Each structure stands twice: as structure tokens, then as C-alpha cells.
Amino acid sequence: MMKNALGNLMQQAQKMQEDLKKAQEELAAMQVVGESGGGLVQITMSGKREARKVVIDPSLVGEDRDMLEDMVAAAINDAVNKVGKMKKEKMASVTAGLPIPPGFQMPF
């Protein structure tokens, strides 16, 4: 009886590992768009937090450089936060029903 339970647990662990790997690959392929200034600055970022594209509205070019730099930084931070939220939601769906302690960080 005990041997069977252990076998089931090992199967579950292996399936979860496969699900996590798949979820990580899906996340890496996903993209988010962070923005600031009501969309005047947009940063497209991958699920691996790599900036893919930067779009700056022409009306900002040649204007206040400090403001433009601040808006780019804000758009990057917005994108990073969106990736973090996306990862959290994705991993929650993979680990649903598992006895994982609150606040436990997945190793990736």
C-alpha cells in the first residue's frame, strides 16, 4: 500500500515538473506592453523580461529630455510588473491544489 502511494506521489511530481516546464516556455513566448504617459511611451517585453521594442511618440522627441527618460523608465517598470503578474497567474494555475506554503518562491 505504501509503495503504491509513493509511486503516485512520484508521478504527480513528475507531471508537475513537466507542467512547470511547459508553463515557463509559454511565459517566455508571451509578450506584454508596458506604457506611460497614456501610451506615449510603450515598451514591448517578453516573458523573460527582455525588452523587444520601444515606441516613443514623435511629440515627445526633442521636448523635455528628462521627462522622456522618466517616461521610458516608467514604461519599463510597468512592463516588468505586468510580466511578474502574468507569471504569478500562470504558476498559480499550474500549482493549484498543491500543498505549497504561502509566500514560497518557485525557483525560476
Image (spheres, helix red, strand yellow):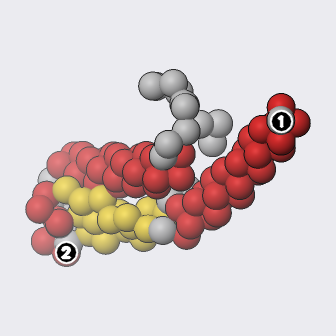
Task: Name the outermost residue toward the right.
Answer: 3
Look at 59% across and 36% down and name the residue there.
Answer: 106
Look at 63% across and 42% down and name the residue there.
Answer: 108
Residue 80 showing in the rendered view:
no
Indicate left or right for 1 with 96 as reference.
right
User: Which quarter of the rendering shows the N terminus?
Assistant: top right
* Position above or below: 12 against 41: above
Q: Give the quarter of the image for residue 13.
A: top right
What secondary structure is found at the residue carrying circle 2?
A: helix
Q: Nearer the viewer, residue 24 or 41?
A: 24
Amino acid at the residue labelled 2: Pro
Q: Nearer the viewer, mark 2 or mark 1?
A: 1
Other-residue count near label 2 (Cα within 10 Å), few / some / many at <14 / 14–19 / ≥20: few
What secondary structure is found at the residue carrying circle 1?
A: loop
Tally of numbered discs? 2
Amino acid at the residue labelled 1: Met
Indicate left or right for 95 with 36 as reference.
right
Residue 74 showing in the rendered view:
yes
Task: Name the outermost residue toward the bottom.
Answer: 58
Indicate left or right for 78 with 92 as reference.
left
Residue 58: assigned label: 2
Identify residue for label 1.
1
